Amino acid sequence: MPGDVMGKPLAISMGEPAGIGPDLILAAYAARAELALPPFCVFGNTEFLAQRARRLGIDIPLASVSPDEASSRFDTTLPVVEVGGPVPDTPGEIDPLAGRTVIAAIERAVAAVRTGSCRGLVTAPIHKAALYHAGFTHPGHTEFLAALCADGGAPRRPVMMLAHEGLRAVPLTIHVPLLEVPRLVTGQAVIETVRIVHHDLKHRFGIAAPRIALAGLNPHAGESGSIGREEIDIIAPAVAQLAAEGIDVVGPLPGDTLFYPPHWRTYDAVIAMYHDQALIPIKTVAFDEAVNVTLGLPIVRTSPDHGTAFDLAGTGRASPKSFLAAIRMADAMTRERDA
Ligand SMILES: NC(=O)C1=CN([C@@H]2O[C@H](COP(=O)(O)OP(=O)(O)OC[C@H]3O[C@@H](n4cnc5c(N)ncnc54)[C@H](O)[C@@H]3O)[C@@H](O)[C@H]2O)C=CC1
Ligand SMILES: NCC(=O)COP(=O)(O)O
């Protein structure tokens, strides 16, 4: 990643047009001065965003610009890096043709960050099933971003982390059927994930000596092997190896009590074994404000913790808090990296 990028805008990918992502982008721009938001540009479709703004009754000027012009235009105009293609303004209704634009917006935004035209990426939510009709082959942004950053080679392991204040939850396995989870809980997965979390907490979150805990896979972390052996056979040996490397990591601990917030707060991150084991606790305590951040990438990427909320799209009733928190976290992470 090119060096001095602090004058550069954040890149925001437009997300699913039938969802609330565009509403939140427009709301964030409308509140930019009051909230002292850093400059950003939207990778998307100007005409569509103008229509959505009219629908929402938000009066803001938009201009098609290049990423290099975005920061200087940001005070007076919402900068849009044009991604072609038909994008109808139909809240709650998927349009199969718009999917290509949604995918291209992510690709173009990633390229802009990787070449240094933008300093970090914030993604508005996508609707995965909608994108599959447009040829999307990844389970989510997380895996797609890892593939884009691999330049055609084998993607490195991307790590999903949901964060709110001191609470950070990481699913070891991400978008996979529950039936496949035990097969994917391997020593290598544990070791690689903990190393990435440890590295990025130090270098992107400024935590000098991260404390990490792992949950078990089975109830009560296997109850000494009587309710499953993955803890004894796989997770504990990996934890011992990581501890020998000097990483402050403990576990496997019972997942139900580990996420009791006073317990959880004693660690800088908790790694769970599967998606819902990690995401249910954090969405329960902080659905409004948690941020989804991808670790293990050469770029900074954040996102709100929620999805497309078709029921709220185009109504102006979606809370912008998590999206605003994602913008602020991307801003802070890029500053931390360049400090
Ligand atoms: N980063 C991303 O791109 C994400 C995408 N998704 C995708 O979103 C789609 C819909 O997923 P759901 O499970 O329905 O979750 P969802 O988060 O879109 O909606 C769940 C509930 O929360 C409410 N909600 C969501 N965001 C809100 C906000 N900002 N303010 C007020 N209420 C809000 C919705 O109205 C709905 O009742 C799926 O295709 C899923 O894969 C889900 C999570 C993240
Ligand atoms: N449940 C989180 C989620 O689905 C977001 O995934 P991603 O699109 O950020 O990979």
Image (cartoon, helix red, strand yellow):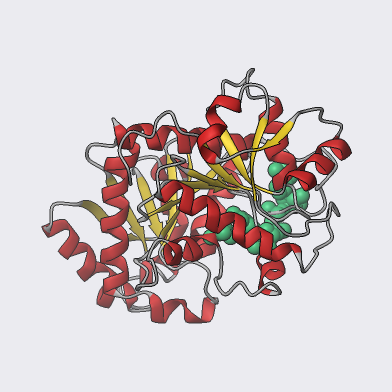
Residue nearer the viewer, 284 or 152: 152
Can I make out residue 12 in this image? yes
Q: Where is residue 302 in the image (x, y as percent from the top left)?
A: 50, 46
Say which residue appears at 32% left-offset and 52% top-offset: 197
Relative to 32, say whether 91 is above or below.
Answer: below
- Give residue 148's quadrant in the image: bottom left
Say which residue appears at 12% left-offset and 57% top-offset: 245
View extreme (top): residue: 34
Relative to 324, say whether 193 is above or below.
Answer: below
Q: Position of residue 18 (x, y in %)?
A: 78, 55
Can I make out residue 227 in this image? no
Q: Where is residue 247 in the image (x, y as percent from the top left)?
A: 19, 52
Residue nearer the viewer, 153 or 258: 153
Q: How many labels does the image show?
A: 0
Say which residue appears at 68% left-offset and 28% top-offset: 77
Residue nearer the viewer, 295 or 136: 136
Residue nearer the viewer, 79 or 123: 79
- Give residue 24's quadrant in the image: top right
- Compared across the picture, whether 22 is left or right of 6 comes to right
Task: Pick the quarter of the image with the C terminus.
Answer: top left
Q: Where is residue 235 in the image (x, y as percent from the top left)?
A: 28, 69
